[in-house]
Amino acid sequence: QVRVAETGGRPVQAGRSLSLSCGYSVYMTCQYDIAWYRQDPGKERDFVASISKDGTIRYADSVKGRFAISRNSGRHTVDLQMNDMKPEDTSTYLCKATLTGVGCPRAARGDYWGQGTQVTVSS
């Protein structure tokens, strides 16, 4: 069973910084692509940032230059550093771990989501 859990969400004032962390359990020799999304009630999940198993990083246009994603392979975590936060960054932030790789059993490959962590940015 692959477990994914987000931590770090809290209220923060606009212009300040906040770091979220996504922890994931290791399953056999699977490799992990990790992505952050955010979702508001009644709306679809929006992509925020991702880091692939080979280190390729992508960002949504809305967070480029403000957010930074990084991986700590030894701790099995991926952090999302959010700087110069804006009220529109208020959302529930969710982490998705995609298991992949030739050494990963087919039955285990796929997407695993955490429960989310709430970030509220006040003006």
Image (cartoon, rainbow, N blue to C red):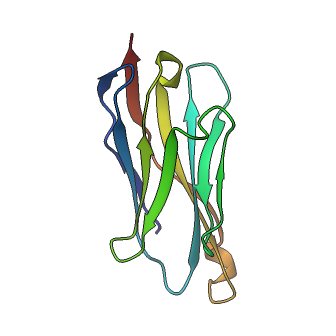
Image quadrant in which the C terminus is located: top left
Which sits in the foreground, 62 or 35?
62
- Residue 87 relative to residue 63: left or right: left
Q: Residue at x 42, y 46 (%)?
A: 81
Above or below, 110 against 64 in this view is: below
Above or below, 93 against 20 in this view is: above
Residue furthest front as drawn: 65
Which sits in the foreground, 68 or 110?
68
Residue furthest top as drawn: 123
Q: Residue at x 50, y 25 (%)?
A: 89
Q: Residue at x 62, y 19 (%)?
A: 42
Q: Residue 58 at what x, y percent from top left?
A: 66, 53
Q: Residue at x 46, y 69 (%)?
A: 1
Q: Residue 25 at what x, y percent from top left?
A: 40, 69
The total of numbered circles placed on residues is 0
Q: Residue 114 at what x, y percent from top left?
A: 46, 49
Q: Residue 64 at what x, y percent from top left?
A: 61, 40
Q: Which image quadrant for residue 33?
A: bottom right
